[in-house]
Amino acid sequence: MNDTFRDLVLGVFLAIMLVYILHVGRGMILPVVYGLLIAYIVIGLADYFARIPVLGRRTPGGVRDAAAMVVIIVALLAVLSLVLANVGNIAAVAPEYQDRALAGIQAIASRVGFEDQPTWETLREDVIGEIDMRGLVGSTVSSLSYYVATFSLVLIYVWFMLLERGSFLRKLERLSDDPARRDAIRRVIRAINSRIGAYLAMKTAINVLLGAVCYVILIVAGVEGALFWAFVIGVTNYIPYVGSLVGVVFPVAISVVQFGAFGPVLLLAAALTAAQIIIGNFVEPSLMGNSLNLSPVAIMLSLVFWSALWGVAGAILAVPVTAILVIVLSEFTGTRPLAILLSRDGDIEYATRT
């Protein structure tokens, strides 16, 4: 009993220490995690190149990896160009949008009879009127340099991970002389590669589809910066449950200022919400199924935990990181019950399914 209590205390202490390290060292840890996830995408893309008839089979693995890296870098540069262009456009029209917002708020106040109230005037002038939209956008532009530097570091990590890919599993196996432990290592790595790779590939494809559908809706509605807002919707959809709502809020909020009428705004909100519901509740389950075997409660708790730990980055990474954690926990007798509780159906025998 004393040994059990001691193990419990040590486990709690270790968990607290790990959480503290993850929080304090997130500036160093996050680029590594991003690099690992991008490496999965690169490997998946390289494997797809290998399936191309004739040419793909004759191309060495290193060449396919390099080609996949080039595709990823070009995609990231295209995203960066899109963001910079739209931030510049928003900065240019920010004063006009601010005036429209103030006019709309004043019109609402007039309708409800508050236009002569000093409290309304104070709110309008001291709160809304003092928002420096240009300064806000300017700070966003300045912070982009930080993200560019971070992504450069991430790409360096990806490249070194790809170089280590061939020898990494062999080095892990040599950590133990026990054949059973070696088999367990192979099983864990195989399960992580299979499940996380499949999840990232399918989720990315679904988000691209969602972004494309929302782009058409935004173009038809006449929303300015439609491509940028469609990209935002696709990226935020990586966040489980709340991401779809957050993605719709931004273009709808912009449309309120742009159109100045609630009719077009309500139609736009209804169309974007319908797209989210159809893809999220019908297309995504049919394509992904239960690929990660995570309980909905576990996903929600992981979203709260990783968001508190790493912010927006944690919200995006919550699902794949938790899936990896469940796979690892399932291999140890002491943590296996926790892995079962976190799973959707209690079936954590990954060796037979990967």
Image (cartoon, helix red, strand yellow):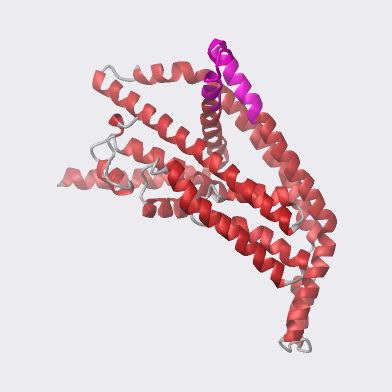
Task: Classify 95 as above or below 6.
Answer: below
Q: Is residue 54 magenta?
A: yes
Q: Indicate whether 98 appears above or below 80.
A: below
Whether residue 240 is visible to the viewer of this picture, yes or no, is no
Tell me which residue sits at (81%, 57%) in the image: 134
Residue at 40 percent across and 40 percent down: it is 291
In this picture, residue 40 sits left or right of residue 180: right
Magenta-drawn segment: 45-72
Percent coordinates x, y for residue 10 in the rendering: 29, 44
Q: Is residue 239 visible?
A: yes
Task: State the image coordinates of residue 334 (x, y, percent, origin top left).
Answer: 24, 40
Q: Nearer the viewer, residue 164 or 201?
A: 201
Residue that appears at 25% across and 18% down: 179
Q: Which is nearer the eye, 291 or 77? A: 291
Of all residues shown, which one is farthest toward the left?
A: 1
As drawn, is 291 to the left or to the right of 353? right
| Residue at the image position 25 percent from the left and 45 percent from the top | 337
Q: Is residue 127 left or right of residue 195?
A: right
Please tell me whether the stretch drawn in magenta is mainly helix, strand or loop: helix
302 shown above or below 59 = below
